[in-house]
Amino acid sequence: MHVYVIRHAIAEDAAAGQADSDRELTEDGERKLRRVVKGLKRLDVEFERIVSSPWKRAWETAALLRPICDTAPVATELLTQSPRAELLALIAEKNETTAVVGHEPWLGELVAWLAFGDTRHGEALTLKKGGVVWLEGSAVPGGMSVRALMPPTVLRNVR
């Protein structure tokens, strides 16, 4: 199984009184993520499904990934918190190439849990906005290997 963990693109700063979950992507964030998607496409990356946080900036990021996925994204609140067993079960349920779109620090914890069996090492991973971590293996704690950590600047420049 292949899992691509993707941090949402650049979002607006929170306005006074605005809920964090309501922050939208900036025009620059959308533009840069479209270029990331082109880079992934040039690398022949395609997803069979996208699982996303329902928070606005992640959901908008998931929508921008549609050119490399034939199915509509699926929202889950499990990506708005530290990862737990239910999230791993959701990721593993179809054994498909899956994009997981969400937020830090939870994505770093997810990668650490999948690759090393322990969420405590998530802070060691630097996942920039629009960045991608490619994992391969079984979606169980310690069951996946990190195949690549792809910063957005690298993906935007794939020719």
Image: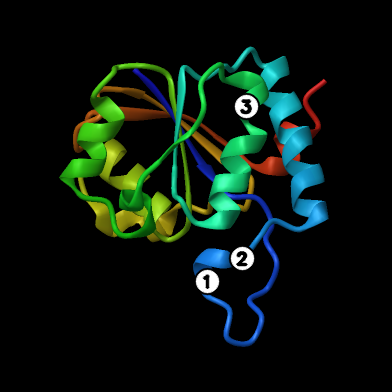
- Whole-angstrom CA distance, mark 1 to mark 3, is 24 Å
Q: Quadrant of residue 24?
A: bottom right
Q: Position of residue 103 (x, y in %)?
A: 48, 56
Say which label, 2 or 3, has the lower sequence index: 2
For label 3, the residue is 66
The 10 Å Cα crowd at callout 1, few under 14, some 14 to 19, many 20 or more, is few
For residue 97, above or below residue 4: above
Whether the residues at callouts 2 and 3 have beta carbons within 8 Å, the answer is no
Q: Position of residue 149 (x, y in %)?
A: 54, 37
Whether the residues at callouts 1 and 3 have beta carbons within 8 Å, the answer is no
Say what amino acid the circle numbered 2 marks. Answer: Arg
Say what amino acid the circle numbered 3 marks. Answer: Arg
Q: Residue furthest bottom?
A: 16
- Whole-angstrom CA distance, mark 1 to mark 2, is 6 Å
Asked if residue 41 lies left or right of residue 136, the reply is right
The 10 Å Cα crowd at callout 2, few under 14, some 14 to 19, many 20 or more, is some
Residue at image location 25% in from the left, 29% down from the top: 139
Say what amino acid the circle numbered 1 marks. Answer: Asp
Residue at image location 81% in from the left, 44% down from the top: 31
Q: Position of residue 30 (x, y in %)?
A: 76, 46
Residue at image location 28% in from the left, 38% down from the top: 114
- The mark tally for this picture is 3
Asked if residue 24 lies left or right of residue 139, the reply is right
Q: How is the image coloured?
A: rainbow
For label 2, the residue is 23
The quarter of the rendered structure image containing the N terminus is top left
For label 1, the residue is 20
Mark linked to residue 36? none
For residue 11, above or below residue 35: below
For residue 134, above or below residue 80: above
